[in-house]
Image (cartoon, rainbow, N blue to C red):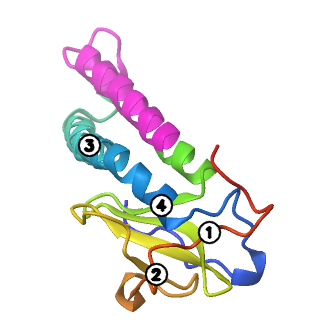
Amino acid sequence: MARAEPPPDPSEVNPSRLWTVEEANARVPELEELLPRLRAWTVRLGEVHTELRRLQEFWGKEIDAPDHADHERKNQLDSEWANLTQRLEESVGSLQREAIELRDVESGLVDFYGYVGGEVVYLCWLRGEPEVAHYHTLTTGFRARRPLPSARHAAPTGRGGPT
């Protein structure tokens, strides 16, 4: 689940909220718990995909016959695939609705929409870091992140707040 989309055009960005550094830091413990689950789900999805592909390549369309020996196994894997996909989509969608972007599930790279120096930016956090301490512009990525100039950056009035 690496960065799937190019950076947004800053003129088209209208996040549902802007996070202060303090608010983003308050979410870090929850993200520390959530990210390993998301990673485990994506790993399992890969395993399920591999097994489904193996069954399909070996048996072809025969696997879809109700009386086939591996038909039930295929149904179980299809069901697990759907369940894991739904859980991932719901979790990532929930973060996105809060203006939190999961950039990479493997490394635990997360961006919060924030406000620094009069500009909407991404407050950037990587799993394992003790707090949100970096940011980058909306058109750059992790490699361009810079230390936050101060620990206190409030979202502008009227641009959103805690949900």
Measured in 3D between alpha carbons, the distance from the residue under mark 1 to the one under mark 4, in whole angstroms, is 9 Å
Along the line of sight, which residue is nearer the eye, 70 or 86?
86
Is 75 covered by the magenta stretch? yes
Along the line of sight, which residue is nearer the eye, 10 or 43?
10
74 vs 93, left or right, is: left
Residue shown at the point (25%, 64%) measured from the top left: 107
Q: Quadrant of residue 147?
A: bottom left
Q: Which kind of residue does numbered mark 1 sit on?
A: Ala
Residue under circle 3? 53
Residue under circle 1? 154
- Image coords of residue 53 (percent x, y): 26, 43
Q: Which kind of residue does numbered mark 4 sit on?
A: Glu
Residue under circle 2? 150
* Disc 1 crowd, CA 10 A, few/some/many (<14, 14-19, 20+): some
**Element assignment for label 2:** loop
Residue under circle 4? 22
**Element assignment for label 1:** loop
* Disc 2 crowd, CA 10 A, few/some/many (<14, 14-19, 20+): few
54 vs 125, left or right, is: left
Q: What is the number of the mark on residue 86?
A: none
Residue shown at the point (44%, 74%) measured from the top left: 151
For the record, the magenta segment spans: 63-91
State which tag comes first along the sequence, 2 or 3.
3
**Element assignment for label 3:** helix
Q: Which kind of residue does numbered mark 2 sit on?
A: Ser
